[in-house]
Amino acid sequence: MVQSSEMGTALKEHLESPAVRAISRPSVRGKFLFLGEEKFYVRGVTYGTFRPDANGNEYHNLKLIDQDFAKMAANGINTIRIYNVPPPRVLDMAQKHGLRVMVGLSAEQYVGFLIDKKKSAPNIQELVRAKVRACAGHPSLLCYALGNEIPAPIARWLGRRQVERYLAQLYRVVKAEDPDGLVTYVNYPTTEYLQLPFLDFVCFNVYLESQERFEAYLARLHILAGDRPLIMSEVGLDSLRNGRFNQARVLDWQVRSSFGSGCAGVFVYAWTDEWYRGGADAYDWAFGLTDAGRNPKPALASVRKAFSEIPFPSNLNWPRISVVVCSHNGARTIRDCCEGLLKLEYPNYEVIVVDDGSTDRTAALACRYGFRVISTENRGLSNARNTGMEAATGEIVAYIDDDAYPDPHWLTYLAFTFLSTSHAGVGGPNIAPPGDGPVAECVDHAPGNPTHVLLSDREAEHIPGCNMAFRKASLQAIGGFEPRLRIAGDLKRPHVELHPYSGFDPQFRVAGDDVDVCWRLQQQGETLGFSPAAMVWHHRRNSIRTYWKQQLGYGKAEAMLERKWPQRYNAVGHFTWAGRVYAKGLMYLLGCGGRIYHGIWGSAPFQSLYQPGTSGLWSLPSMPEWYLATLFLVGLTALGALWRPLLFASPLLILAVVAPLVQAGVSAARTPLRSVHRRGIVSLKFRALIAFLCLLQPLGRLWGRLRHGLCPWRRRGPVCRSLPRPQTFSLWTERWQSPDERLESLEAALRARDAVVRRGGDFDRWDLEVRSGLFGAGRILMAVEDHGCGRQLVRYRSWPRYSPAALVPTLLFAALSSKAALDHAWLVCTLLGLTALLLARHTIQGCAAAMA
């Protein structure tokens, strides 16, 4: 006994040593948990609650607990979830069997004191601090759970903001006591609307017995989690009502679907049928993997097998994937990329590095890793991507930038999405790696970084070029013609030749190629998918100068895309995305308000936060055109010294300057800076940098656009020679066409004249709208009469539509000007009206030319 006691003391001293604790503490990196450098998948079960003894000790049968932990470890379980703080002896037993523990802090038990604020209420912060102190730093500790399912009626009564502040306050208490400990909160669908961005990772209890609905909700939860890990903190099925074999079947696909979707872990509810709740033992349910006597059910074997094959079974027929890295002078970052590609855990892939005319050591560095290197002259990014595609031997071509490196399971999640769907392309998140420094972190939280656009939780409209993969056959099926300048014969006369290409459009040499290829695939009827766990680490710009150059390049790409895809842009010159842009900087910049769907009397089982779009007034100061308006107001105010009526612009100028400053400040204040733990001057300095980047980004985009022709006053379409007026055309034709075919022919004729054409919707009384700039457009209505023998009478009616943008300056002028300026308001109104007529009239001319 003495020897055993001495060994136990020595073991305890060893476990308490700083070196062991530092190695064993878990950390969060992107979408996964890590122990040291090894990814840690949580394969867990819940444990308890049990009937306490006379002293109130829930964990009094240490022998039974030790047996339970041994059986868990033998069945492939590596984590247990306990709903309250266990005594140190239980944590020691978990450490003995190699188990990690999620410790519950029971914040839901104290939430009632927020409603009834009595003087006799306990000090909740001190209670939580004492609980954390009891187990802080223990080697078996996985994380702290602030609470478990604050009841939806209570959360509705208190309001979302108060509950969020309550949990944020407790989070700070835990971090103050154990700075290196991970903290989460266990939520459930009925309070899904809670916004808790400060948590280290996201946990949800979900009980759905339909695999299709379960997987759809997993996709939604991944969107809510963002760049953080998602853990299913409770899944299960009652074997008493559904049968033991049905329980085993459902748990099998629940575990596999969770890991297959990209979850970092799963807790099966529960280890045993023994359960104590509300002062009594429960006998009318049986969620356990074992019964109350610890006899295993069929579900235990099912879960053991599913846990042994995570994240995917090894016997799947994995397709061959060709990874293409395109680089131009990327020697500074390509080493990390190549090392990451060597660590990929995928059975069938190759790596092709396309050196696009680099003048540094890019090719030599890539050759050291044994990858296939193709060196070409500098022809631009799209040509390099096409070169890699043509050399690829895989049926799937995956692209990654030279300043990014992949997660080891990157290709696995991409390939699984291809195997389970018919998508032509699949993308995933790109996350800033830790350790790049505070400036790179500030850039990561600023707007303008590459991001994805989603049509739904699983379908994408755009996937960024630093993390995208396509079926090779789908890429080869799209193409076009590239104009090339050639010198003919001895006359030395230049002429343009059209050369066909497949894949990426060669005109996009730096950026914009990914947007273009996504749109062209969708134009052919293909779809794009999104896999939240197919993650790459993408270095952000680490200086203001390089960030500025990046935004200039993106502005140029937007101008090039607008010339090729005018129908994808609005009158001002912005993308008209059908989906939602998921960007960290944009989220903080535009706020996260919205309305909560509670259902009648708060009875909805899934209560979501519906956020408004980004087209409201709050988004205006973040637009590049705001700077043009500010410059215009500066000019008017300066001219006010010569003509006093123009001083009406002074209050508008103050508003134009203050609005973006306020918006940038609010965005910086909302941003959670994880690498800057200290408050005060240090935190303020980096938040000021984020605010500055929020102001710099639209200016960089604007300058890049203006330099390449994308401006609000741009004109598209033929020039007309007459003022527009409502016109009606009637044409007889002997060539019969359906109304849809005739409408498509008219649309194609207008587009051939460089017109920006938009089709009418389900509630519109017009068929086509031809835009003529910021101030107006023309609309067309068509009717087809069949007269037999293939003869048709086609009627067209066209009329102008004037944009409200032509009236806004006039109204502001009238509302804010002095009495002297009002005398001249009629002149401004007349000039703006004529401007609208002149800018809109070419649409009618284009229509007439197409109908003739």
Image (cartoon, rainbow, N blue to C red):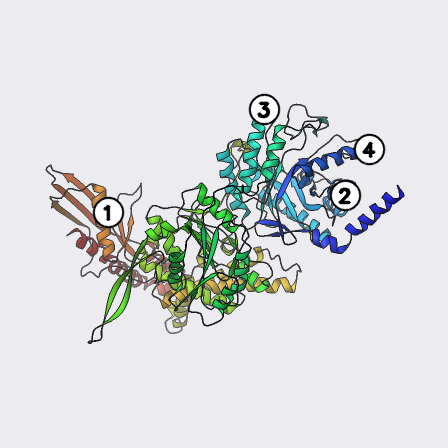
Where does label 4 land, which residue?
A: 55
Q: Distance between the residues labelled 4 and 1?
A: 81 Å
The kind of secondary structure element at disc 4 is loop
Number of the label disc, if any, that sits on residue 453:
none
Q: Residue 384 falls in which quadrant of the image?
A: bottom left
Precedes in sequence: disc 3 or disc 4 = 4
Residue type at mark 1 is Glu
Viewer-side label of 3, 1: 3
The kind of secondary structure element at disc 2 is helix
Query: First in sequence: mark 3 or mark 1?
Result: 3
Badge number at residue 744? 1
Q: Name the residue under label 3.
A: 243
Judged by depth in the image, the label closer to the viewer, 3 or 4, is 3
The residues tagged by marks 3 and 2 sit, at their Cα atoms, a distance apart of: 36 Å
Point out the residue furthest to the front here.
370
Indicate the secondary structure of the residue bearing disc 3: loop
- In the picture of the structure, the residue carrying the numbered disc 2 is 92
